[in-house]
Each structure stands twice: as C-alpha cells, then as structure tokens.
Amino acid sequence: MFTFLASVGAAFFGFLAATGRLVLFAGMGLAALLSPPFYPRLILRQIVYMGYYSLPVVGLTAIFTGMVLALQSYTGFSRFNAESAVATVVVLSVTRELGPVIAGLMVAGRVGAAMAAEIGTMRVTDQIDALTTLSTDPFRYLVLPRLLAGLITLPLLVVVADVIGVFGGYIVGTVKLGFNPASYLTQTETYLERMDVISGLVKAGVFGFIVALMGCYHGYHSRGGAEGVGQATTYAVVSASILILVANYMLTTAFFGT
Amino acid sequence: MSDGRTPKIAVRRLEKSFGPKRVLDGVDIDCAVGESLVIIGGSGTGKSVLVKCILGILHPEAGSIRIDGEETVGTNRRNRERLMHKIGMLFQGAALFDSLRVWENVAFGLIQGRGMERAKAREIALTKLAAVGLGAEVGELRPAELSGGMQKRVALARAIAAEPEIIFFDEPTTGLDPIMADVINDLIITLVRQLGATAVSITHDMVSARKIADRIAMLHRGKIVWQGPTKDIDSSDNPFVDQFVNGRAEGPIQMEVRAL
C-alpha cells in the first residue's frame, strides 16, 4: 500500500516538475522574442521548411476533409429537409475548427517530430554544447527561430487549408450532390463572418507555437543516445497533438462560449 | 588578461552531483598561462564534467572557477559570452554541425559569435583547415562525408579559428588509429605553441598525455589525487597513478564488475 502511494506521489511530483520545466522553457522562448539577435536567415529557413514543404500534406488533408464534411452533412440534413445548410456548415466547420486543427496535427506529425529529432541528435552528439563554446546562445540559435516560424507559418497554412477545404466541399456539393454552383457559393459567403476566419487564424498561431515548443522542448532535453532521441520524437508528436486539442477547446470557449 | 602570475584557470573546492552521485568532490587545480595541462583518469571519474563546469555548460553546486582571476561561477549570460571569446573546445566526438559545410563549421564562431563577414570568415576557415592539413576542397564537404580522423582535424581547426587564449581538448585521440592519433597530438602541440594558448586536455590515452602535457593531474572519485610535471609521472609514488599509468587491474582503483 505504502509503495503504491509513494509511486503515485512520485508520478504526481514528476508531472508537476515536468510542467514547471515546460512553462519555464516557454517563458524563456517568449522572453527571447523581445530582444535580439533573431537570426533572420534561420527564421526564413524554418518558415520555408515548416510552411512550403507542408503544403502538400495540409492541402490533401484539407480537400478530403471538406469533401467528407459535405457528404456527411448532406446525409444528416437531408433527413429534415435542410440540405441548403450544407455549404454553411462546410465553411464554418473548416474555418473555425477543422482547418486549424487538421493543419496543426499534420504539422505536428511532419515538423514537430523532425524538430525533436534534429535538436535531440544535436544534444546527444554535443553539438548544442559546441554552440555554447562558439559564443552562440543555443536557445536563441535553435529554439527561437522555430518558435517564431511556428507562430507565423501555421496561420498562413490555415488560410490555404481553409480555401482548399471549402473548395473540396464545393466540388462534392456541385458535382456529386447536385447543388447549383452559384447558390452554393452564395450560401458559403452569406453566413461566413470575419470572426470565423480570425478565430481560426488565432488558433493556428497558438497551434504553431505549441508544435514548435513541444518539438524544441523534447529535443532540447533528450538524453541517452538514439533511444532518447526516438522517445523525444514520440513525446513531441503526442504531447503537441493533445495540447492542440485541449487548446482548441479552450480557445473555442473563449471566442464563442456562452 | 592575466599578469603572468595569476593562474589562467583556478578551480577551488568544486563540487558537482547528479542526483545522489557526487561526481566532483572538492576539486582544486590551477593551470598557468601558456601551460599544457592534461587531466587523466578512468572513464566516469568526472573529467568531462570538470571541463563542462569550467565552460559553464554545467553548473556546480559549490566552489569557485576563476579565469584570468575573474569568477565565472554564477556569472550572467553577457559575461559568459565574453569569456567564451577566450575559449576554444575540441569535443570527443568532434560535434560538427551536420547541416553546415566543413568551412562553415570552422567559421561558425567567427560569423555567429563575432559577427564577422562570411567572405572574410571563409578565408580564415580555409587557412585554419590548411593548418590542420586539409585542402580547400574539403571545406565544401559535409561532416558526414569525412573520416573520423578528418572530423577531428576539422574540429581542431574550429577550436583554433578564433585564436582563443584557452583551448580544451576532450579525449582528442579516442577512436583514432595510432598514426592518426600521433598526427592529432603533433597538431595540438604545434598549434597551441603557435597561438601561445593555454591548453587543458582530458584523456585516458597515456601516450597522448605524455606527448602533449607540461603537467599531468589525475582525477579519481571526484578529487585530484596527484599532480606534477610530466617527467615525474613514472616516479609519482602514488598508487592510483602507478596503477593507471601501467594499466593494471590490481590496485586501489577497483572496477565494479560482477561475475556472470
């Protein structure tokens, strides 16, 4: 019994310590945003890597999500003769929720894992210590450009995902479900409000920060060679995915909760 | 700058633990200006931890580390970066940046640490690569395309690129064949003399230690158990040193091994 309680207590304190370390790491990241050096060349490289090279995967998931959404909402709404709401449901769902969440999860899998693996390998091969000995702050050189790239890039990706996702719904709506193209577009435009798009972009910024933060944090603190780097990669993707979903609920409540 | 009497590096009562394991247990050691000090000791005795504490990569729980008389324990980031301008380091595994070309690795401290223009830094990098016997064509390669010995030479070129006052060498010959190890030893001696730098090396390679050291210190269980001129290493009358230098399993240093 005592052993059980001790292990529960140890796990609890371990969780608190890990949370504290993560919050401190995030705080250092935010504080570093306020003063130079910023390494613009590295920030640009990360933006290209995180944004441009994620376009295919984000675009593909967005178009199929929009298409499925149109099909499913048509199936449901046709039961009570509300088929005309399909275009509105697609555009609101994509801009408010599915665009940011799906882009965030895809980028977490593609980029967050790569960040953790790259920084983790640098940690276990002394490259991060080498940065220190070369008068370069490893936090500013490695972490800051990735955090900034996450903040900037994911909203841009979500703009693309929104357009492609809505286009996917339009294709299914007009080609498969027989909607008139002009009325589908009118329905899409009429009920879409500026706040729907803005809330999605704010979410995207937060999700981008989360993906970069978890990738950098787990990579930066990885230990023990190849196994440690592998663990860091897994933790980065899993923790970023969970935090994205939690943050999504909290932000939705903040924007639209009553 | 040092006045010549103040030790370049002075370590006093340095303590560092990892959880319950005390790795450094009151280390006291000095290194004079222009001296080549080699710290020997078995694996896991705290040699790398000592150097990482001096570099500020690890933070000791107690004790003092002075460089040119200036206390470095607990110093702020700005002072640490200024101190780092005096220091070069060769890591055991070379620690070259995979994503950069060889010349960019060598020039890294000049470009990022000191804000030098890339063209000028490249010129210096190629000069330093030549000093370690590598041609300009090697400068365009990636570290992964080099052999272990070439990587060590590139790391050496990087360590001396900014012409530091102090150079640390962490196991400079580990993993190299005897001939390449001797090439690295010769390069260390030549380059340290050319720069007039102070050198601190950690190794368990006695051939290397005898060749590059002016003075040798032995670290065992977190303490300096012996130190003296290199010529005295074989007549130290210290049982730890005798056992280590002669590579005997029997003696006061016991490896914790269990029967199968």
Image (tube, coloured by chain):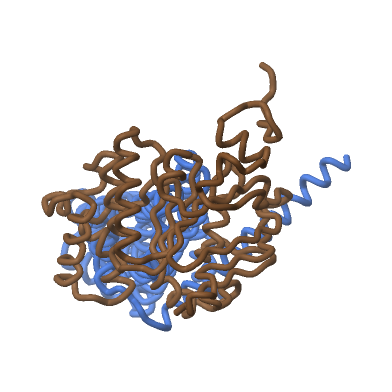
Chain colours: A blue, B brown
Residue A206: horizontal and vertical position, in percent? 44, 69
Tell me the quarter of the image containing the N terminus of chain B: bottom left
Q: Nearer the viewer, residue B37 or A3?
A: B37
Residue A103 visible from this viewpoint: yes
Farthest residue to the top: give it. B260
Q: Nearer the viewer, residue B100 or B61?
A: B61
User: Which residue does the image show at 73% across and 54% down from the upper left?
Assistant: A12
Q: Nearer the viewer, residue B157 or A208?
A: B157
Relative vertical location of residue B179 with respect to residue B236 in this rendering, above or below: above
**B85 sits to left or right of B99:** right
Farthest residue to the left: give it. B137
Q: Quadrant of residue B178?
A: top left
Residue B152: horizontal and vertical position, in percent? 32, 47
Farthest residue to the right: give it. A2
User: Which residue does the image show at 42% across and 42% down from the upper left?
Assistant: B208
User: Which residue does the image show at 50% across and 70% down from the upper left?
Assistant: B8
Q: Quadrant of residue A207?
A: bottom left
Residue B147: horizontal and vertical position, in percent? 26, 39
Relative vertical location of residue A232 with respect to residue B78 in this rendering, above or below: above
Tell me the quarter of the image containing the C terminus of chain B: top right
Residue B112: horizontal and vertical position, in percent? 30, 71
Residue A188 visible from this viewpoint: no
**A55 sits to left or right of A69:** left
